[in-house]
């Protein structure tokens, strides 16, 4: 059980980090404009930030629904990472890709461990 607790704590940290990175990246994208500020792109990053916060909250309080929220979080984070990856010459966008992929992997694992 301690290993699962450590994995959950790590997942919470990754969700909280991804939330912050997505929020900061949205601000970056809106400043740059152009393709960075396309409505679908901003909406996806916003969805990612919000689901990360929700998944972390569910895990913090031991919700019976945390595995399902983690599964959805993994899906949205993976999609967000793929979308941000198209801006391969922008280090801020690539930092978002890394945070989203790390969160997606951890949330996927949480969704399987506690399903």
Image: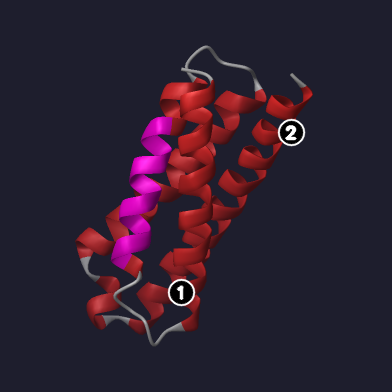
For the image, the number of numbered tags is 2
Q: Residue at x 42, y 84 (%)?
A: 90
Magenta-span inclusion, residue 84? no
Residue most extreme to the top: 64
Q: Is residue 50 above or below residue 2?
A: below
Measuring from the top left, give residue 60's x and y in whole percent: 66, 26
Q: Which of these two is toward me, 47 or 94?
A: 94
Residue depicted at 35% across the width and 68% down the height: 84
Mark 1 lies on a secondary structure that is helix
Q: Quadrant of the N terminus?
A: top right
Number of the label disc, if any, that sits on residue 7? none
Query: Which mark lies nearer to you, 1 or 2?
Result: 2
Up the image or down, 64 lies above or below 41; here it is: above
Query: 3 above or below 42?
Result: above
- Stretch of the chain drawn in magenta: 71-83
Which label was assigned to residue 94?
1
Q: Nearer the viewer, residue 5 or 53?
A: 5
């Amino acid at each position: 059980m301690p290993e699962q607790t450590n994995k959950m704590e790590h997942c919470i940290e990754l969700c909280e980090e991804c939330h912050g990175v997505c929020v900061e990246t949205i601000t970056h994208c809106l400043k740059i404009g152009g393709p960075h500020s396309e409505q679908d792109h901003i909406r996806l990053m916003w969805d990612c930030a919000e689901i990360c916060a929700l998944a972390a909250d569910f895990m913090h309080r031991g919700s019976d629904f945390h595995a399902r929220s983690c599964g959805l979080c993994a899906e949205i984070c993976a999609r967000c990472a793929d979308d941000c990856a198209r801006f391969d010459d922008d280090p801020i966008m690539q930092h978002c890709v890394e945070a989203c992929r790390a969160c997606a992997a951890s949330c996927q694992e949480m969704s399987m461990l506690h399903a």
